[in-house]
Amino acid sequence: MPQGAYDLDAFANRPKSNYSGIRVAQGGKPNRKRLERLRSLNTAIMAALLLGLACSLLQSYATLNELNMSVQYTQNELATAKSEYDYLSSVLSSKTNLKTVEEVAGTELGLMKRDESQVTYITMEKESVISSPETGTEKLVNYLHCLGSDILQALDP
């Protein structure tokens, strides 16, 4: 099948139009009053922005100053607490010193160190015996006996 080609000669005898796509609008020069209003509006907006930035800068300086004072106050409290901790630690170590404890025990309480003559040794039986039930039935009976005695003790006023 033959393929059709474009025939460009069909468009050759067409009349050319003068339409260029440009449209002319009324009032070609900008209005001077309108430009002045836009400039004053622009100036007012810029002044408002600068004022807002200045206010936020002052607010941030005030907040920073307040936080610095709070940190300084907390650091002073910490230093006071550390000095009190050091004092109490030294008092505690002096009171728990072994020589101080022995001195207080001897002078105020009248206690003495033990002698070897005061030690008595007691001989116990050779081996310790723990008896436990071997069967499941004996374990169950012992459990029920303990349970019953616990219930009776709880009910006894």
Image (tube, rainbow, N blue to C red):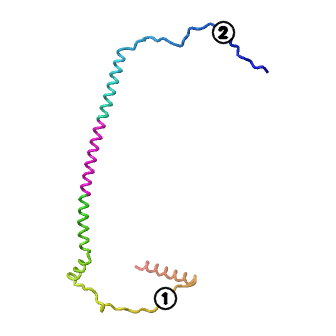
**Drawn side of residue 123 relative to residue 148, left or right:** left
Q: How many marks?
A: 2
Task: Choose between 143 and 40: the one closer to the eye.
Answer: 40
Secondary element at tag 1: loop
Q: In front: mark 1 or mark 2?
A: 2
Q: Quadrant of the rendered structure where residue 42 is?
A: top left
Secondary element at tag 2: loop
Magenta highlight on residue 77:
yes
Magenta highlight on residue 90:
no
Q: Amino acid at mark 2?
A: Ala
**Drawn side of residue 65 relative to residue 42, left or right:** left
Residue drawn at x 68%, y 13% as measured from the top left: 8
Residue drawn at x 70%, y 13% as measured from the top left: 7
Residue 72 circle label = none
Q: Position of residue 139 (x, y in %)?
A: 54, 82
Which residue is disc 1 drawn over? 129
Q: Amino acid at mark 1?
A: Val
From the image, which quarter does the C terminus lie in? Answer: bottom left
Task: Choose between 15 and 59: the one closer to the eye.
Answer: 15
Q: Which residues are magenta?
A: 55-78
Which residue is disc 2 drawn over? 12
Q: Position of residue 44 (x, y in %)?
A: 32, 25
Q: Quadrant of the rendered structure where residue 124 is?
A: bottom left
Q: Residues within 10 Å of mark 1 (few under 14, many from 20)?
A: few
Please report whichever mark, 1 or 2, sits nearer to the chain's N-terminal start.
Answer: 2
Q: Position of residue 29 (x, y in %)?
A: 40, 12
Residue drawn at x 20%, y 82% as measured from the top left: 107
**Drawn side of residue 21 relative to residue 31, left or right:** right
